Image: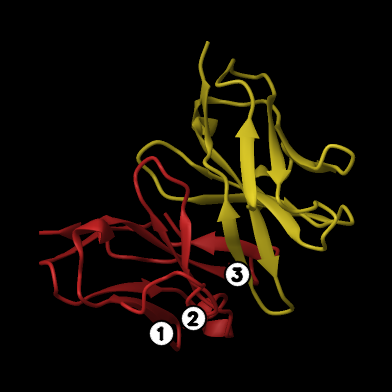
Amino acid sequence: QEQLQESGPGLVKPSETLSLTCALSGFSITSGHYWGWIRQPPGKGLEWIGSISHSGSTDYRSSLKSRVTISVDTSKNQVSLKLTSVTAADTALYYCARIMTTMTTRWIDPWGQGTLVTVSS
Amino acid sequence: QSVLTQPPSVSGAPGQRVTISCTGSSSNIGSDYDVHWYQHLPGEAPKLLIYSNINRPSGVPHRFSGSKSGTSASLAITGLQPEDEADYYCQSYDRSLSGSVVFGGGTKLTVL
């Protein structure tokens, strides 16, 4: 069964770096798909963070571009997210997902269960 | 402020039909980029409901259907059931934002 499972610290201090890992099971990270991160701040809607291809090509939300890095570890079949200099505005439920990508569109399926990250001192 | 605009809430009685609109612009839906829909139940992972405007993934009931015209798209749910009560999000692709994925603000469906 294809699954994605996010993990990482649930509490991060302001100005520090948020680091999350997404473990894939049931499919290979080198399968040719894109892998991405989406977040949902409390009481708000979904927000695109960015994605990475199997070859390492990345795209990021423009407002986060200076702070975000998405990478893959093929030996562990994992995708990682790093977000530096966090503030309370980065408090959110963070989802890992497979990004289905064609020449003309992208959609998201499946999604992980999500992991809550709170930025607070 | 989301790039795609959805009504904050819709409601309907069991068995009724409801529609959820998703309005974009010439840089996303109007540029012929596909629209996709997700159902998000509390405490669960969002689930793909409709992809590429009209297509249902395996396992999604035929009660759910999508359409697209111009700079807008719609999700229709017929024969409303209590378990349909959830948040629904539309999603597309925007060429003015470095080719970014964009979402609607979400619509809360209440089954009365």
Q: Choose between A80 and B32: the one closer to the eye.
A: A80
Q: Residue furthest front?
A: A1
- Which of disc 2 and disc 3 is earlier in sequence? 2
Judging by the rendered image, the residue that carries numbered circle 1 is B67
**Location of residue B18 by image quarter:** bottom left
Kindly identify the amino acid type of the residue bearing the numbered disc 1: Ser
Measuring 67% from the left and 19% from the top, which residue is drawn there?
A: A16
Cβ–Cβ below 8 Å for labels 3 and 1?
no
Q: Which residue is mark 3?
A: B94
| Element under disc 2 | loop
Chain hosting mark 1 = B
Disc 3 marks which amino acid?
A: Asp
Q: Is residue A58 visible?
A: yes
Q: Which residue is mark 2?
A: B53
**Which numbered disc, 3 or 1, marks the residue that appears first in the sequence?**
1
Which comes before the other along the chain, label 1 or label 2?
A: 2
